[in-house]
Amino acid sequence: MSKQIKIVLIVLIIFTLVSVGFTYTLIKNSTSNVYKENTNNQEINVERGIDLYDTYNENDLLIKDLLETFSGEEIKIPQIEGLKNKQIEEKINKDIYNRCFDYIEGNVKNIAEFTQMYTSYNVMSNFSNIISINYYMNINTHLHLNYNLLTGERLKLEDIFVKDADILEIVRDAYRERLSNYSYSFEFIDDDGVAIFDENELYKIVKGYMNTSEKDFMLSPSEIYFYFNNSGASVKLIEIADEISIYTKYLTDESIYERNDIGRKNIFTLVETNYDLFDIIDYGYLEDNFWYDVTVNKMYFPDGQVPNEKMEKFNAYAKTLTNEAYEKVNEYREKAKDNPDKFYILICTPNVSMYNDGKYESGEWFYTYSNMAISNLNTKVYEMPIEMYISEYKDKIIDGYRNNYFVMRGGMYYVIEEPESGDSVTYEKVEEQRKYNYMTNKEITSLSEIFNEDINYIEVLEKMVKRELIQYYERAENEVEELIKSAKYDFNGWDIKVDIPQLENFRYTMHLSTFDKSMLNIFDKEE
């Protein structure tokens, strides 16, 4: 082999090795949400989109109420607490304070028709060293407070995105979808019945928004909300995941917080509270080899339908369900700590309803609400080796939640099946129903507590069962008398189910609405 050929081969081999190494680096970096780049001997974050299979920590930050007085009314202003850098903390709090007062002062004239001024706020985002707060009064306006916790500077809309993101297109698409859903913007209906909105209106809104020096927006873990004048639109982050950098852009190797036990650790991204859920909502997080989902659902009551005292008592009872669910969570968290080689999944889905009697009159429903709450407590617990969780369930669980991120309930049920006997997954299921008189704070354990004392309810029930046996089961009257003696009554909260052991095919249920309210002890006497 000639010397020249040897040199060419050596060059080719070196080039191939370098190319393989470079390609490997690209692949490695492309699968990571963020990677470190060394610039002037200092590591900085290089922007990436959201990793849909990753989890992120909430900030270890407290948000407290500062109570002040404005025009004789008490107002509430949010203040942060917990940053190591107190100068930055003070800078943010001072800016929030001044902006809230300016906002209130500018709008107080618009609430003259209200007897009392009301101020409140929602913390929309508190993760990855940023915060987004929605501040509002009892008028249809809001103040959006967004901050970079590293510097104390106000967060700009551009800060949320990677540098090459087409923000104009994202905003335009969001407003296009928004306008398409409102008839006031329609120009006409085409031949196919499709509403066509005014393109000029879209152009004016988007141009006006993009030309605003400080663009008004609000950020939740699942959506960005854009606001211009009285027009708002939003985009789901899952739809623009590659364009979003906010989950990693401001992360630091060293924590910027004084504590590490405030924020939830390893939260799932792209999730949002469903508004019909009650009280404490947790999306589930990976901590101490433990994953859980607690959703406590309760009825929705239009304003003013239920008397205040009843509503307060009912809410207090519903609160106990949440507390019980979290007691179970804490029990398994401790168990998970003691068994680090196992992974635990716990699902609690309590439901609580207030029994009511409805009547339909003159084209409208009228309801009378009872003192009885019916709750169904459903708990499922899975225990499995940690290796099995990682290899078989982790991505499926996250996928399930990502695909159902707005309607939270049910994500788990599609990916975990009840294990068969002998599997390495153990399974525990608990279903319980309770009937509770929330006004007296006593559990209802028997039918005698449903009916008034002066009612011989057994006689009433037997009379109804007797009629059923004669009319629909064609039993002779003398035979019916004997059958009724063995009848058993089971009260499940809404119905009274009747069982007669001698008749296997006997199926009879009496709904509580069958009885006049005056017979039932669960309604107030004046009702």
Image: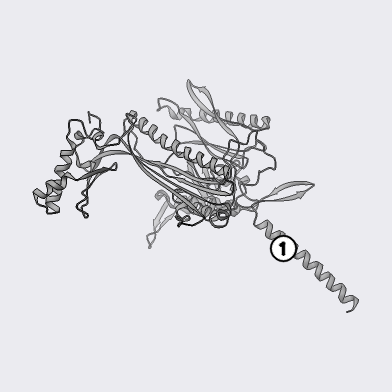
Residue 520 screen position, x and y as percent: 22, 35
The reply to whether residue 146 is in sight is yes
The extreme right residue here reads 3
Which residue is located at x 66 percent, y 57 percent?
Answer: 30
Which residue is located at x 58 percent, y 28 percent?
Answer: 97
Residue 418 screen position, x and y as percent: 44, 55
Residue 440 screen position, x and y as percent: 32, 29
Q: Quadrant of residue 12?
A: bottom right
Left or right placement of residue 380 versus residue 169 in this view: left
Left or right placement of residue 98 versus residue 255 in this view: left
Tag 1: Cα neighbours inside 10 Å, few (<14), some, or many (≥20)? few
- Quarter of the picture containing the C terminus is top left
Q: Nearer the viewer, residue 7 or 122?
A: 7
Amino acid tagged 1 = Thr
Chosen colour scheme: one colour
Which residue is located at x 36 percent, y 30 percent?
Answer: 313
- Quarter of the picture containing the N terminus is bottom right
Q: Quadrant of residue 129?
A: top right
Residue 177 screen position, x and y as percent: 47, 52
Name the element at disc 1.
Answer: helix
Please state the total of marks drawn on the protein image.
1
The extreme bottom residue here reads 1
Q: Which residue is mark 1?
A: 23
Q: Nearer the viewer, residue 263 or 334?
A: 334
Q: Nearer the viewer, residue 112 or 381?
A: 381
